Image (cartoon, rainbow, N blue to C red):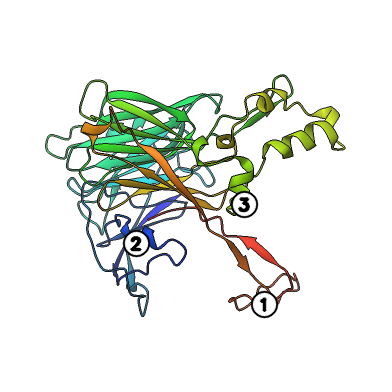
Amino acid sequence: RAPAVCFLRASVRDRPSSPHLPAMAGLAPRSAALALALLAPSRLVNAGVAPTFDTTQKSSSGPTGFAMASRVYVPYDAGASYAFGMGAVEKTAWDEGEKYLYTVSEAGYVNVVDYSSPSSPSVVSAFAINLKGKKLTDIAVCASARMLFVAHGADDTVSNGRVRFYATARREGAVAPAFLKEVVTGPLPDMIAPNGDCTMLAVANEGEGKYSSATGLTDPPGSVSIVKDLTAASPTVVSVSLASLGSDEELIAKGVHLPLSKKAMEYWDDHSAIAADLNFSTARGSYTSAMSLEPEYLGWSASGSKVFVGLQENSAIVTVDVPAAADWASKPPSASRIDALGLKDWSESGSTAGVDLIADGNCTLKKFPGYKTLRQPDSIA
């Protein structure tokens, strides 16, 4: 089947704070009035408002009363091409003012779904944005500022990416989204998030590496971009380096997982059984610890003074301090700390009910001595 967007209604109770990072209870929560469930990885983006509720007590129950109100199928291009497996709805963004849902596809298109009638949504083909050929990674809306942001990586993945700014579609007069400008970010801007009052934009630049037989390994550092002056003709972009968070040895001592540290590069490049087939020399020559850190998701604190950045491959959270925009000349945004999320213990000494590791057609939970796994969370909300 083609990817579908489902509109769900639910009553939502308070959510518990993180047991691993108590400070994360300050994260600005997403709108809890509605949930958008997609048959693809997604999240609800509702920037421009920062609702608050108590997260200090664990909820006695989860969301209740879910009922599907509607389903709409979204094309993967700017027309009527529907197919399974085409990644038509990779990410979404919700404009609560105009009641439009924006979707991005792997084929390089942004589509708009009209939710003025939740029971009968429809795709507005005339509003589609054709970015065919670009590697779209994320989309976000500032409804109060009538701005739409679309992130995409470079053609080669390892060069700097971009975030494109658009004026949002308007229901009155049936006005389609209009391109405004773009800013340069770090390599592979995997997630974008406006702050609560839509005066800044945070970008998680994953910086994934790429290997080719001709040039060897190219591995750009992971970073975070903070953008201010969003309404200006040329917004200000500050790139926040993660190299200051520690050396490889210091990060490992904190429990941060490094998928390919400098010593690991040296082993594979010089001493492994496949060393003759590898070329890590360029990456080793320019190595910093930030090359092993890959920002994936991020979320603003309710105060707008911090951005919490999820590093999935590293199983860690980075805190970025964001001063008031007027203070950036003397105190620009900077990464202040990194916290490992620890290991999940599946042994008798752990707190789990066990895990089923045997493919025998049954679900038998057992505990295994010394068996621990990385948490590697994929999102922040």
Q: What element does badge 3 sit on?
A: helix
Left or right relative to 343: residue 37: left
Q: Label 1: few (<14), some or many (≥20) within 10 Å?
A: few
Mark 3 — residue?
Answer: 253
Q: Write the residue at 41% across / 45% down.
A: 91
Foreground mark, 3 or 1, reads 3
**Mark closer to the chain start, 3 or 2:** 2
Q: Residue 345 location in percent, x, y? A: 63, 69
Q: With respect to residue 252, does 29 lie above or below? A: below
| Residue 358: image location, x then y, percent | 75, 71
Select label 3 or label 2 by which is in front: 3
Across and down, in percent, residue 379 comes to: 45, 53
Residue under label 1, please give it. Answer: 363
Pick whichever, 113 or 328, lies toward us: 328
Q: Which percent across, then down, holds residue 161? A: 45, 27
User: Which mark is first along the chain, 1 or 3?
Assistant: 3
Q: Is residue 184 left or right of residue 282?
A: left
Instruction: Give amino acid for label 2.
Output: Ala
